[in-house]
Amino acid sequence: MKTTLKALSTAAVAALAMTAGAAQAEVKVGMITTLSGGGAGLGIDVRDGFMLAIKQSGRTDIEVVIEDDQRKPDVAVQLADKMVQSEKVDVMTGIIWSNLAMAVVPSVTAQGKFYLSPNAGPSALAGRGCHENYFNVAWQNDNLHEAAGAYANSAGYGKSFILAPNYPAGKDALTGYKRFFEGDLAGELYTKLGQTDYAAEIAQIRASGADSVFFFLPGGMGIAFLKQYADSGVDLPVVGPAFSFDQGILQAVGGAALGVVNTSQWNKDIDNATNAAFVDSFQAEYGRLPSLYASQGFDTANLLISAVEKADVSDADAFRAALKAAEFDSTRGDFAFGDNHHPIQNIYAREVIQEGDVFTNKILGVALENHSDAYAGDCKM
């Protein structure tokens, strides 16, 4: 079902995951994201942030078709084919998981469509596999983990035990941490994607002689690990990326996460007018604090809007240049793309705190300043 954005509240979009747009859209956007099963909260937040920006813009010339990938690569591929070939979308967005991005993005860009990533940033698409029609508005996968390694150095950690799921983003995570961490490794593990029992891994950590733990376990995986780790009695400091300490996850983890330092390019207390307005309006619209993923969806939509205001999507060169210019007000403050169309940005160390009944994060400082990614030099555009 399709209807105009003015006639449909953003809350209804969130509840029904249906098409929102005008009858005669100038730009048609296909959003494939995870709206059910494990990790659904991440996709819901990306979608809600994206649709909030569209609503606030007042534009009726952007149509958004929303589909649930169920976190399954084969489903994502089928949906992408339908959107490109039947729905005739101009731009695609929404994918959370790197294995799904690797299955979808190269095909979409090869067919002349634009892809704006609000989350997944696999290394293969940042270097030799980059494409002129692919823009990542979030980060390259390694970035937040690189910042965690830099923070671990500053905290004086010298022997980390590291673990992540065995899929592209997990491999990028451990690669990124090792790239910046100057100490030794007490152990390195790849876990099963979707795993929820970490008793064996925690036993290995206990026996390893580590002085710290770094993990990347997004969504429900991180909730399970943190709870089990807190109950285990292992008393080693934990460092991780925002994905396991983000707003939606923290309420499920609770006190087990208090005091943990994690890294992010966004937080609700970044001091700029756009971010303050975003946090307030998101909370008013949805009744919850925004997450990192919501901020990325919001920024992705505003990047798109900035390009629509400057160029016609049918003029691919002009539209691409308008995207690259990134002339929009980001929740992060200053925003710029590198030559491989990935952000150059500050990445912060932040600490999990409690405000009343709500668990959240506060910024401690900048872990990496104006940081790019390690693969940009391999990108030949």
Image (cartoon, rainbow, N blue to C red):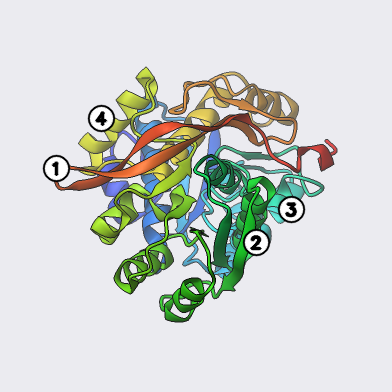
Q: Nearer the viewer, mark 1 or mark 3?
A: 1
User: Which amino acid is tagged 1?
Assistant: Gly
- The residue drawn where x is 81% and y is 37% is 377
Name the foreground residue: 10 vs 342.
342
Label 1: state its secondary structure: loop
Q: Mark 2 near mark 4, Cβ–Cβ under 8 Å?
A: no
Residue at label 1?
356
Give the number of the disc on residue 171. 2
10 Å neighbourhood of mark 3: few (<14), some, or many (≥20)? Answer: some
Q: Position of residue 38 (x, y in %)?
A: 41, 68
What separation in Å lies between label 1 and label 2 (alpha carbons)?
37 Å
Q: Nearer the viewer, mark 1 or mark 4?
A: 1
At label 3, which amino acid type do we have? Ala
CA separation in Å, label 2 and label 4: 36 Å
| Image position of 65 with respect to 225: above or below | above
**Disc nearer the start of the sequence (2/3):** 3
Q: Where 323 sits versus 190, above or below?
A: above
Image-quadrant location for residue 15: bottom left
Q: CA distance from mark 2 to mark 3?
A: 11 Å
Instruction: Answer whether residue 207 is visible to the viewer in this image.
Output: yes
Query: Which of marks 4 and 1 precedes in the sequence?
Result: 4
Q: CA distance from mark 3 to mark 4?
A: 36 Å
**Residue with the mark numbered 3:** 124
Residue 24 visible from this viewpoint: no
- Check contact, mark 1 vs mark 3: CB within 8 A: no
Whether residues under marks 1 and 2 lie with C-beta atoms below 8 angstroms apart, the answer is no
> Quick one: SS at disc 3?
helix
Sequence order check, earlier mark of 1 and 2? 2
Question: Looking at the image, is mark 2 or mark 3 nearer the viewer?
Answer: 2
- Mark 4 is surrounded, within 10 Å at the Cα level, by few (under 14), some (14 to 19) or many (20 or more) other residues, namely some
Residue linked to disc 4: 280
Instruction: Identify the mark nearer the N-term, 2 or 4.
Output: 2
